[in-house]
Image (cartoon, rainbow, N blue to C red):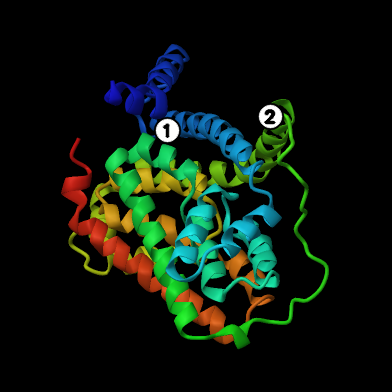
Amino acid sequence: MWKFIQDELLGMNWLERLLGRGLLAANVDIDSRIGGTLHFFLYDVIKIMLLLCFLIFIISYIQSFFPPERSRRILGRFNGITARIVSALLGTVTPFCSCSSIPLFIGFTRAGLPLGVTFSFLISSPMVDLGSVVLLTSIFGWKVAIAYVVLGLIVAVAGGTLIEKLRLDNQVENIIGADTLHDTEQSSLTIRARCVYAWEQVLSTAEKVYPYVLCGVAIGSLIHNWIPEEVVIRTLGGTNPLGVIVATVVGIPMYADIFGTIPIAEALLGKGALLGVVLSFMMAVTTLSLPSLVMLRRVVKPKLLWIFIGICTFGIILVGHLFNLLQNILLTP
């Protein structure tokens, strides 16, 4: 039953077979490079967008119970490591990309929450979300999905803890002014109103995300069908001890969310790249994108910004090496 759920419902293997038959009926040889590229592109775009819309609706419905002011009140009830854990968990039900998390981070900072708590949220929000569990399960299996989420939360909590211990409150820029967050009382919303809100979020997020999905799938299809397997293995496989570092450094300048990075990761893994390498790439892209760092620089001073980058980079590389060590266990059905 679980294999059916993973392969047919989450992985949508039925869609792959359906598209394959359709392309063959149109006299397209899906075993050729061009036909295989087209098959991979169509299958991944449709699959990811279908999952994306479904997941955004569910997550947005959940989000309707947690407007910014309520989230602040929840976080304000906790102290120490518990507050950072709750903050990291709260990040799992927030928008998908790192740039979307910055306004909430600003609001939490203005509300006077401890710096470590706000940074635990800032790290976990783009790196780990409810959608990543489902999407990672559909591609890599439930073991990888759970390990990714758990280790991502550990990085978020550990990073927030270290930043708080360094006492860097003086490294926050003066951001006093009108709050950019909209606080509406949502506790009395009807089910219909929450569904309308969730559908609006589906349309809005899908409009923002689809270019990155198209770009990610296009890159993934080229890797899958055009780059020789020996090149990927030599660069990102077990023969290169620096593969995790290379993937992390390459991922940082890019900007996408988890939906845009998964097709690339899927293609790299299929070509022989190590699991830790592809997941480090995903974490680097979603957590340390250049646009989000530029936005964050308006909120924090350079010293804190570089410490944040260093902590995240070190954590991602460490997690990548751990995944490499556990690859055989995690990828065993």
Give the camera-side residue of 202 and 240: 202
Choose top left, top right, bottom left or bottom right for residue 321. Answer: bottom left
**Residue at horizontal 63%, vertical 65%?**
105
Residue at image mark 1: 40
Residue extending furthest toward the right:
178
Q: Is residue 263 left or right of residue 197?
A: left
Discs 1, 2 touching: Cβ within 8 Å: no
Q: Viewed as shown, does residue 184 lie left or right of 209?
A: right
User: Does the rendering let one see residue 237?
Assistant: no
Q: Nearer the viewer, residue 74 or 36?
A: 74
Crowding near the residue tagged with mark 1, few <14, some 14–19, many ≥20 C-alpha atoms within 10 Å: many
Q: Residue at x 57, y 61 (%)?
A: 75
18 is higher (above) or lower (below) than 147? above
Quadrant holding the C terminus: top left
Of the pair 176 and 272, the residue shown nearer to us: 176
Which badge, 1 or 2, comes first in the chain's sequence? 1
Q: Which residue is mark 2?
A: 195
Horizontal placement of 139 versus 125: left or right?
A: left
| Residue 86 coordinates in the image, percent (x, y) | 49, 58
Give the Cα distance between marks 1 and 2.
33 Å
The x and y percentages for residue 217 are: 48, 41
Q: Residue at x 78, y 76 (%)?
A: 176
The N terminus, quarter of image = top left
Name above or below for residue 318 compared with residue 190.
Answer: below
Q: Secondary structure at mark 2?
A: helix
Disc 1 versus disc 2: nearer the observer = 2
